[in-house]
Amino acid sequence: KYASPFGYAIEVSKSYTGAVPPEYLRKQTLSTGERYVTPELKELELAISTAQTRQQRLEQQLFDALVERIAGKAEELLSAAAAVAELDALSALAQCAAERGYVRPTFVEESFVTIEDGRHPVMEAVLHARFVPNDLDIRVDEQRFVLLTGPNMGGKSTFLRQAGLLAIMAQIGSFVPAKKMKLGLIDRIFTRIGAGDDLASGQSTFYMEMAEAANILRRSTRRSLLLIDEVGRGTGTLDGLAIAQAICEFLLGLDDQSPLVLFATHFHELCALSEHWNLVANYHITAVETTTRGAPVFSHRVQPGSSSRSFGIEVARMAGLPEAVIDRAQEIADELSGHADIEARVPLRKRLPKRVLPERQLPLLASPS
């Protein structure tokens, strides 16, 4: 029997202690009997206590021998792993292309990207038949700068990501989710999509946005594809619009070295660039407002021309913003329409109805008594 901390022992009840052999050595006295050890038992205990150490040593020896043996075959194993990985990737791409109706893209010498009925590979898998395909025609010598406007939630960012994904898929040798695709080789794809800061380095969202834009302007070439989504939104409207327009003018001013650009924005003033540069093509995503207070219906269809509004207030209503806030926002929007000086044109309303906020939040925002 094993009893910590004494180890293994032979336990004998009091009624039998008189029959214990003389070679037994008493180790512990109990209320019910005695515990003894023998030389043989001590040897066994020592063997057991060292067994784990010997086991670990043996395992390490076997492992080291196995590693040495594998290291001698490392080159062959890595080559086999690479072949299996490539086969797995090609098989997956082929299966996906067959099941989802992908087509083989055509490559040309010129720098352009044309896509007929292109589809976002991930969104299509999620939405199935409900995904709306779109065309894209962007070429260096004709319309190399596509300016995309449209409502919030309309699908501008998805359209930009879709163009980038299809270009990558084509250049890795995959079929693409489209009815037809033709493109020249693209050396780099630059993106300025989304928003985020870097708290560790103290860089704000707007700083990160500008840093990414600066990298794009420095490193893009005539063979690059630029996907820029709402640049300038991280600061005030006036500064944001000025920076966005300056970036557009810089890229257009590169002349024959200008890259292919997809530029999504809510600054509708930028659409006037097409009046000064023939290489700018205005496109928009349509939306239809069903009723006076109803939610807009998004077509997700990209069409020629510019959009006149962003449906921001309608989307805010869809998100559940209190109706009093929506009504006031509409009043302010009506007042601001056609005016640039907000403070001069719009009288401030210092107080909104109490029902704007849930009752549990009112004490947090109430003025001190």
Image: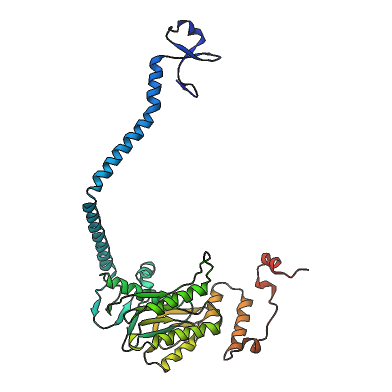
Q: Is residue 86 left or right of residue 130?
A: left
Q: Between 11 and 93, which is closer to the camera in this rendering?
A: 11
User: Where, by quadrant of the figure, is residue 48 drawn?
Assistant: top left
Q: Is residue 216 above or below residue 10?
A: below
Q: Is residue 31 above or below residue 3?
A: above
Q: Between 100 and 218, which is closer to the camera in this rendering?
A: 218
Q: Residue at x 72, y 69 (%)?
A: 366
The furthest residue to the right: 369
User: Where, by quadrant of the figure, is residue 58 drawn?
Assistant: top left
Position of residue 273 measured from the top left corner of the image (x, y, whole percent): 43, 90
Query: How many marks can you see?
Result: 0
User: Where, by quadrant of the figure, is residue 142 drawn?
Assistant: bottom left
Colour style of the rendered protein structure: rainbow
Position of residue 46 measured from the top left corner of the image (x, y, whole percent): 40, 23
Determine if residue 291 is in view.
no
Determine if residue 317 is in view.
yes
Position of residue 336 measured from the top left corner of the image (x, y, whole percent): 60, 88
Q: Residue at x 34, y 81 (%)?
A: 136
Q: Is residue 332 left or right of residue 35?
A: right
Q: Residue at x 61, y 74 (%)?
A: 322
Q: In which quadrant is the C terminus drawn?
A: bottom right
Position of residue 321 measured from the top left corner of the image (x, y, whole percent): 59, 73
Q: Between 94 and 87, which is closer to the camera in this rendering?
A: 87
The furthest residue to the bottom: 275
Q: In which quadrant is the N terminus drawn?
A: top left
Q: Is residue 305 left or right of residue 200?
A: left
